[in-house]
Amino acid sequence: MTVPYSRFRLSHITLGCVMALAALPALAFSPAGQDIDYQTGDEEFEGYYVAANGDSKGSVLIVHDWDGLDDYERQRADMLAKQGYDAFAVDLYGTGNRPQSLENKQAATQRLYEDRERMRSLTQAGMEAALSEGMNSSSVILGYCFGGTVALEMARANSLDNIAGYASFHGGLDTPEGQSYDADIAPIFIAHGGGDQIVSLEDVATVSATLEEANVNYEVGIYSGAPHAFSVFGSDRYEEQADQRSWATFSAWLESRTD
């Protein structure tokens, strides 16, 4: 089963992300890792890498929201490092490209929505950069909002080696026309807000039915009343209970994927 690709729908999803992030204040945060410069072709990118505390259990590749890699993804990476995972936040926009206006954010994401091959290749380039830094080769791909859409794109492509799972937090769930899920892909985790007005519960039911039909190992967590982008610290949509419960559930799922 596939759901037709809708440009309007994707723009609607990304609009919800910027509404959530517009109120995000500057947070006191001191990164434990380091920014990493890397290249693919003649393009330059800047990711963020932090090694696991102690022996690594595995690794997590984090895909940013539509405003690009910032301290939100760095903070999530540091949280994962404290739990024993190597973490690398990938950059899909390019060094210095951290769009601020609504129009620029829409343009940055739309370019990748319309060029799925580029979306996938840039994600793979980030993975290669992470591995060159010494990241554990058994990896989960985790994305937020736009990044969650990317994580599911990579699941459908199923083109990377040693992927232990894919995770989407309040991401887009549509399956583009012509794409599908295969039974042999790694397990999928989806965290979704029950009060999300951007990605509906009907969308959750549709992707669940799609994954069930394809015999994919998946888990969906729905958190009552939580709006779109509920896990973004400091935003006007942040829901502490939904964030903490979804992170605890994800952490247990991650542990099971990297045992």
Image (cartoon, helix red, strand yellow):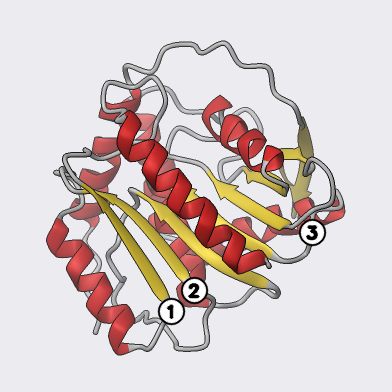
In the picture, the disc for residue 45 is none
Label 3, on which residue? Answer: 136
Tag shown at residue 187: 2
Q: Nearer the viewer, residue 60 or 225?
A: 225
**In the rendered view, does 29 fall on the left or right side of 183?**
right
| Camera sees residue 1 | yes
| Circle 1 residues within 10 Å: few <14, some 14–19, many ≥20 | some
Distance from Cα at disc 3 to Cα at disc 1? 23 Å
Left or right: 3 with respect to 188? left
Q: Say whether disc 3 or disc 1 marks the residue closer to the N-terminus.
A: 3
Q: Determine contact: label 2, label 1, CB under 8 Å.
A: yes
In the rendered structure, the answer to whether residue 97 lies left or right of residue 115 reads right
- Quadrant assignment for the C terminus: bottom right
At x 76%, y 31%, the residue is: 33
At label 1, the amino acid type is: Asn
**On screen, residue 229 above or below 174:** above
The answer to which quarter of the image holds residue 228 is: top left
Q: Quadrant of residue 242?
A: top left
Q: Position of residue 194 (x, y in %)?
A: 18, 48
Q: Nearer the viewer, residue 253 or 38?
A: 253
Q: CA distance from mark 2 to mark 1?
A: 5 Å
Q: Secondary structure at mark 3?
A: loop
The residue lying at 18 percent from left, 45 percent from top is: 224
Residue type at numbered disc 3: Asn
Residue tagged 1 = 217
Crowding near the residue tagged with mark 3, few <14, some 14–19, many ≥20 C-alpha atoms within 10 Å: many
Residue at the image position 76 percent from the left and 59 percent from the top? 128
At x 23%, y 79%, the residue is 209
